[in-house]
Amino acid sequence: MSKIKFGTDGWRGIIAKDFTVDNVKRVAKATAVWAQKQNPDSKIVIGYDCRFGGDLFSQAAINVFCSSGIKVFYDRHFVSTPMISLAALNLGCELGVILTASHNPPSYNGYKLKSKHGGPLIQKYITEVEELIPDSFATEDLSPEEWEQKGLLEFVDLETMYFAHVAEYFDLDAMNDSDVVVAYDAMYGAGQNIFPRLMPHADFLHCEYNPSFYGQAPEPIAKNLKELEAYLREMKHVDLAIATDGDADRIGLYNGNGKFVDAHHIILLLIHILHKYKEMTGKVVIAFSVSNKVKKLCEQYGIPYEVTKIGFKYICEIMQNEDVLVGGEESGGIAVKGHIPERDGIWDGLVIVEHLVNQEQKLSELIEEVYEVVGRFAYNRLDLHLKEEQKLQIMENCKNNFYKNFGGIPVSNVEDLDGYKFYLVDEETVMIRASGTEPLLRVYVEASTEERVAVIMEKVRQTLLG
C-alpha cells in the first residue's frame, strides 16, 4: 500500500488514483484510533464539499468510525470547512473531518482534520494520526440509516447551525437593507447555498452545483475570476464582490470597478477595521509569505505580531492559546477575533461589508486609509510547473545562497523560515517556495506598483529557469 502523508493543509490526492475509498478508510481508521486514545467516548462530525464523490468518501469514513464505536454527526448535504469546524466545537466532538481538496483542481479530493477547538488540528497531532495509518483492515459497511438505527449516527443541519452563528454576530437586516450592493462568486464551491441565505439581495455567480468546477481550480485569485471581473466592469451598480474557494474558507475580493484586492490587502483591511474602528486588541499572526506591510501596520498601531511557517494549522495553534486579533495567509485564508480559530472567507467578507454599511464608505476609500499608514504596494504570485529534479535544484540553490541578484537587482538579505524570502531594494521582496500540496514552485513578488512587480517577476523567472 502507498504511504499516505498530510501536506500543508490535509491529505490530498487525485480521485481514483490516490484518493480512493480504500485509502480514505485507512486514514479514517487512524483518525478513529487517535480520537479514542484522546477520549474513549470520542465523537466525530464529518461532511464534504462540492467535489466529486464527497458523499461516497464520507460514507466510507463513517463505516470506519461507527464500526469503531464512535458516535458520528453527519450532514448529508455539502458543507463548508468552517461549518465543520464550528460543529466540532458546538457538538463537543474530539475531531471534525471535512472531505475537500480546497482550492486544488477538480481532479483532486482531500481529507482535513479539525480539532475540538474549532480550527485545524495542530501539526503534532496530525503526525500522530499519520503514524497510525494501517496498510489494510476489515470494517463493517452499513448504510447511514442502519448506523442511525444502531444509535451511532445522527444527521445534522450544519448550514443552519452556521447561519445562526453568523446572525448572532452580524446585523444581517441592516446589511441587507443598505444601499451597499454586493456580488458573490461561489466558484461552484460550498458557499453557493449559505451566502444567498445570508445576503439574498446580492448578485450571484457560479452558485450552482458542478463538481467539475467547469475545469477551473476553485482558488479565488485574479486569474481564476475573469468572469467575475468582467461582470463587475459591465455592471456598474456593484460596490464590492466577494469570492470564496471550493470549501469556502478562503476569500478573494474586488472593488466595484473590477479591480482585484489580494489577501495581503484584505488582512490589512481587517486589522484596520477591527483595531481602529472597533477598538479591538490582540496579536496579529501571519504566515511567512504575507506582505511585510502587515508588520508595518502593526508597528504603527502598537499591535504585537508573530510570523509562522506556512499552513494555517500553525496560526490556529497560536489562536488556541493566545488572544489573536487576525491570523492570515497569503492564500486568502484568514481568521478574525469573535469567530472560531478557523479561516472563513464568508465571515471575512461580511466583516468588510458590515463596516462599509456602518461607515457609509467605499472599499477604495478604506484601502486609501490603509495606504496612508503603510504606503502603496502591489503583490503577485507566479506558479512554475516544473519537473521534480528542476524544482529540487532551484530549492537547493536557494539553500546554498546561490542567488545574489535577480536580473541585476541585488539581494540584500535572505530569510528562510519556510521557503526563502529575498529582500531587494525599496521594500521589494521575492519569495520562493515549493508547494506543499501540488507539483509546482511558487514565486511571490512585492513592490511599489503592479508594473514593477511584473518586471521583477520576469527577471526572477529568467534567473531561475535560465
Image (cartoon, rainbow, N blue to C red):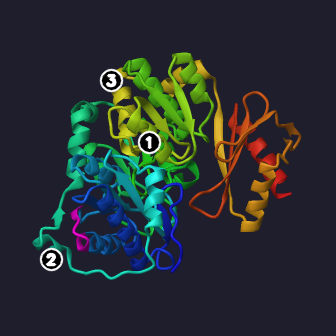
What kind of element bears circle 3? helix
Tell me if label 1 and label 2 are in contact, CB under 8 Å. Answer: no
Mark sitting on residue 317: 1
Rounded to the nearest angstrom, the CA distance separating label 2 from label 3 is 50 Å
Name above or below for residue 26 compared with residue 251.
Answer: below
Mark 3 — residue?
358
Question: Which residues, given as a range, are shown in magenta?
Answer: 66-73
Where residue 267 appears, as percent x and y from the top left, is 50, 34
Label 1: state its secondary structure: helix
Residue drawn at x 50%, y 54% is 227
Determine which residue is flagged by label 2: 146
Question: Residue 448, position in %: x, y?
Answer: 70, 31
Amino acid tagged 3 = Asn
Q: Which part of the image, by quadrant, shows the C terminus?
A: bottom right
Is 371 displayed left or right of 208 in the figure?
right
**How many residues crowd mark 2 within 10 Å: few (<14), some (14–19), many (20+)?**
few
